[in-house]
Image (tube, rainbow, N blue to C red):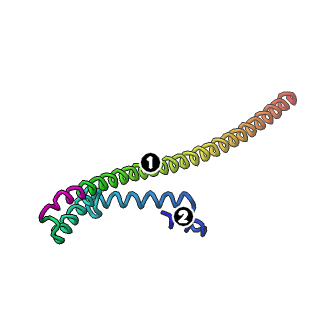
Amino acid sequence: MDAMSEVKDQGNFTDQQIQTMKIAVVEVFKDLMSKGVLPNQEQRIKEAKVAMAEVVKDTGLVEGDISAEIEAKKGEQDMALDESKHEQQMKAGEQKMDIEKAKALQEMALKEKQVAEDLRIKKEEAKQDKQIKEKTSKAQRYAIRKGGNDATDK
């Protein structure tokens, strides 16, 4: 995300374009996780547990009285994983809020453009109506004058 901000300083993208790209990237990652292409948080935790079990097995730490030490380390690891999971959930929540905020800002910008366009159209219509009324009024006055002159000539 910082890379996008750096590119912005070079003048290639507007803030709106950067926000749109960020939203798109987050949504792609979310879709990839939901389809199983990228591992989710639970899968990462299971991977870490399996890796730890393999390390314990390969080093031979399971033998003897070391089991209490292993349980303590497992507890520490579980706590660290829980903390990591919590942090990821918080970040996901923040990202979701950022996405919703960006969407709301985009919708608001579109509505503002629509209102401005509607106002421009209404002004143009009012201007045209005024011109039509002025032309009609001039034509009526002319007809009255002409009709009045015909009446006095007879």
Residue 2, magenta (yes or no): no
Q: Quadrant of the C terminus?
A: top right
Query: How far apart are labels 1 and 2 at the CA level?
Result: 19 Å
State the image coordinates of residue 73 (x, y, percent, origin top left). 24, 58
Mark 2: secondary structure: helix
Residue 67, magenta (yes or no): yes
Task: Write the start and end of the magenta stretch as one range.
Answer: 64-73
Left or right of residue 11, residue 62 in this image: left
State the image coordinates of residue 14 (x, y, percent, origin top left). 57, 61
Q: Amino acid at mark 2?
A: Ser
Residue with the mark numbered 2: 5
State the image coordinates of residue 37 (x, y, percent, origin top left). 27, 64
Q: Amino acid at mark 1?
A: Met
Estimate how packed mark 2 is, as few (under 14), some (14 to 19) or many (20 or more) residues with alpha carbons within 10 Å: some
Left or right of residue 153, residue 47 in this image: left
Left or right of residue 1, residue 138 in this image: right
Mark 1: secondary structure: helix
State the image coordinates of residue 65 (x, y, percent, origin top left). 14, 61
Residue with the mark numbered 1: 97
Which quarter of the picture shows residue 38?
A: bottom left
Residue shown at 46%/51% (left/top)? 98
Q: Earlier in the sequence, mark 1 or mark 2?
A: 2
- Would you say the residues marked 1 and 2 are in contact, meaning their CB atoms lie under 8 Å apart? no
Residue closest to the eye, 111 or 32: 32
The dominant secondary structure in magenta is: helix
Q: How many marks?
A: 2
In the image as oriented, which residue stretches furthest toward the left? 64
Identify the disc placed on residue 34. none
